[in-house]
Image (cartoon, rainbow, N blue to C red):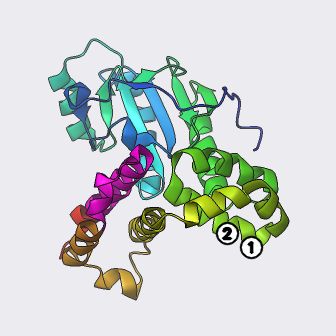
Amino acid sequence: MAALIVAAATAGAVDWQNAEPEARLGGRMISAGYLKGKVVLVDCRDYGQKENLAAMKRLQALWTAYKSKPFVLVGSHTGAASDRRIAAVMEKFGLTYPVYRDFGGDGVGEAISVFDETGRRYYAGADDKAAQAVVGQLLMSMAAPQTEAEWTRYLDWEVRHTPGAAYLRLKEFAKQFPDAAKTRYGDDMKRLAARDEVKTLAKLVETARLMKDRDTASAAAQKLTKARVAAEIRKYAPLKESDDPDVVQEAKNALAELAWVKATLVK
């Protein structure tokens, strides 16, 4: 990673706090489970103060640019302003990213923090522009890792927590680094490939990615309809009944992405 990444914490998922519906002040609804496997930026500030407006608008621009990616921006209101005032501020200035009261958890500071999909913190500070640069770098690395070390950084976590994503990434890793794939992840690939529900989950994860990150100007995207997405949601909904909690959570997250795609369509 480039020098813009100024802080890195120990590995491990963050124990997100105050992600319940009653803590939500506005914007898209999320949950602690929904953040699993995503790049997360937490912006802690008083959302009722005018001097924070410029930064909030820049963060909205970031959310608009990257909300179709595996990324979540969460505003954490830490001030004394009422819930009604924060909701009014968000509506007036068009802030659509999730804002919760006192959102955070272990490893979240008092300013801005950026975490990669494995829960490692890669930025901690007060400069929202630097934080945005880190988000871009992490999303680029996550989508197209270049070195074997970058691939294994994600795979070591995914094979333990997100089996669908792990199955997809392992197949790509084996094409680029066949020897390393066989020696380091051979057993993991056999274990995942032996489970039909994991292969079905991988298809769901891939479908959600393609639909959410679609080129809206393409002919295929123009043909996408609410009915088509609804059919995909029904097709994969049984995965939520799995006995494997990791399968259940990953399926719920991918189905939530499809629900978001459906809500954005006009026909």
Around disc 2, counting alpha carbons within 10 Å, would you say few (fewer than 14), some (14 to 19), or many (20 or more)? some
Q: x, y percentage for residue 73?
A: 43, 40
Around disc 1, counting alpha carbons within 10 Å, would you say few (fewer than 14), some (14 to 19), or many (20 or more)? few
Q: CA distance from mark 2 to mark 1?
A: 5 Å
Residue 197 - label: none
* Overall secondary structure of the magenta section: helix
**From which residue to which does the magenta span run?**
236-260
Q: Nearer the viewer, residue 231 or 53?
A: 231
Quadrant hosting residue 47: top left
In the rendered image of this protein, does residue 224 appear above or below residue 103? below
For the point 47% across and 54% down, the residue is 66
Quadrant hosting residue 94: top left
For the point 32% across and 14% down, the residue is 79
Seen in the image, is 42 located left or right of residue 117? Answer: left
Q: x, y percentage for residue 232?
A: 28, 72
Q: Quadrant of the C terminus?
A: bottom left
Q: Which residue is mark 1?
A: 175
In the rendered image of this protein, does residue 57 appear above or below residue 203? above
Label 2 element class: helix
Q: x, y percentage for residue 134?
A: 63, 42
Residue 172 - label: 2
